[in-house]
Amino acid sequence: MIAIVYPGKLNGAQVAPASKSSMQRACAAALLHVGQTIILNPGHSHDDLAALDVIQKLGAQVEIQKDRIHVTSKGVMPVGPEMNCGESGLGIRMFTPIAALSSQSITINGKGSLVKRPMHFFDEIFPALGVKIQSQNGYLPIQIQGPLHAPASITVDGSLSSQFLTGLLMAYAASDAKDAVIKVLDLKSKPYIDLTLSVLDAFGWKVAHTNYEQFTFLAHPPLKELIEYTVEGDWSGAAFLLVAGAIAGPIKVKGLQMNSTQADKAVMQALQNANVSIALEEDGIQIGSEEGDALRAFEFDATDCPDLFPPLVAFAAACMGVSEIKGVSRLAHKESDRGLTLQTEFAKLGVQIDLEGDIMKIHGGVEIKSSTVFSQHDHRIAMACGVAALKANGPVTITEADAINKSYTDFFDHLAQLGAKVDIT
């Protein structure tokens, strides 16, 4: 798919997409919950659909309706020898420990960039938990065989990704590992663990932590037979709408929770640092002004929310001066090596990006050039270029733009509904 986005102003209101972070965790919890779960406001991105496929491969019955998903589960009971997590990094890292609750041998696979992402974590951790594992030197496909029924206390490295810990927390909680302790060294992306704990708590499992360094599993009443869980709006996807509103608005973004534990809610701080007009109203977030804000360069630490790099690069390109974003080391193992990808693709738009160790410097306030860019098969790169195009001196053509389907299928449609001219071929 090719998307051509033309420069222009936006106006109106748009509802944020459903959070795939919340949706995928809800799918996992619904599988682990012995009983029935109704998931309200479900997402329909490729990652969401991959999660639904995985829980069915692991034994859940799923009925998809227009505004809800009904899940019936007896726990982890694989119905076949393989599960495929698509291109979802969270999916592969979260569902692998969950699949290990079964005694059945199962092969875990993925596609696209996922086959290039390191999974050495499981090679190191699973033997200590009595789980057999065979990987391709730390890469997919992985073959495992549990069961992980009586989890042992372990120490894990949290520096590469919090997603591994999410899977362990869910598997331990569901196995009622009351005496087990998970100790974590150098945990990154703590807000994502807050989201995991929030989902577990909504279903009835109780997990406590000390400074995110030690997690313990508490006794809890029996889980309800029927549990309803509402997927919240996605701050990761909405960050692109908010940035679009900041540089080409004003617009209103609806459906976001200001008390959310999602890490990418931090985008609000970056926008405020850059002098964006923001009003929190009862029905949504009003962002940008009719006159246009005098946007200034900003500094922001994205170590705990690395998915904000792409939208914030598009934003920084419109800000006067050199903006600095910390946390580049978290970008290497995404759908692309996002630090280098952002540098390469935004250079085509006339925006200079310097990578200096863990710091990215974006030289903003220059004329954004009409050009053709390549998504690198990365959904967030496609969306970042689409947002930057709103301030360009002519149309920006984005090749392989269907990468957006991984997380925000309706992105270009939503831009068009806000008044942008978008051609899709």
Image (tube, helix red, strand yellow):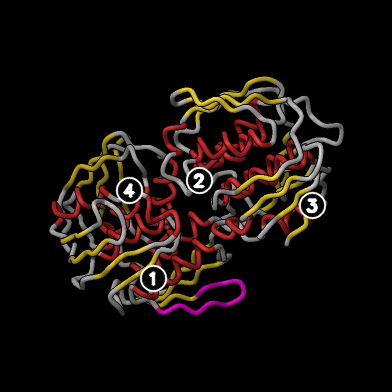
**What residue is disc 1 on?**
55
387 with respect to 57 (left or right): right
Task: Give the prevailing secondary structure in the magenta stretch.
Answer: strand
The residue singled out by tag 4 in the image is 118
Q: Nearer the viewer, residue 29 or 48?
A: 48
Task: Specify the amino acid type for callout 2.
Answer: Gln
Looking at the rendered structure, the secondary structure element under dot 4 is: loop
- Depicted 412 relative to depicted 343: above or below: below
Q: Earlier in the sequence, mark 4 or mark 1?
A: 1
Q: For mark 2, give the secondary structure.
A: loop
Dot 3: few (<14), some (14–19), or many (≥20) neighbours within 10 Å? Answer: many
* Tags 2 and 3 touching, CB below 8 Å: no
Where in the figure is residue 133, as x and y percent of width and height?
A: 19, 60
For the point 63% across and 27% down, which residue is it? 352
Q: Which residue is mark 2?
A: 262
Query: Residue type at mark 1?
Result: Ile
Which residue was labeled with disc 3?
A: 418
> Earlier along the polypeptide chain: callout 2 or callout 4?
4
Residue at the right extreme? Answer: 291
- Residues at circles 1 and 2 in contact by the CB criterion of under 8 Å: no
Cα separation between marks 1 and 2: 23 Å
At x 34% / y 54%, what residue is drawn? Answer: 93
The residues colored magenta run 61-69
Indicate left or right for 298 with 388 as reference.
left
- Label 2, label 4: how far apart the Cα atoms are: 24 Å
Question: Which of the marked residues, 2 or 3, is nearer the chain's N terminus?
Answer: 2
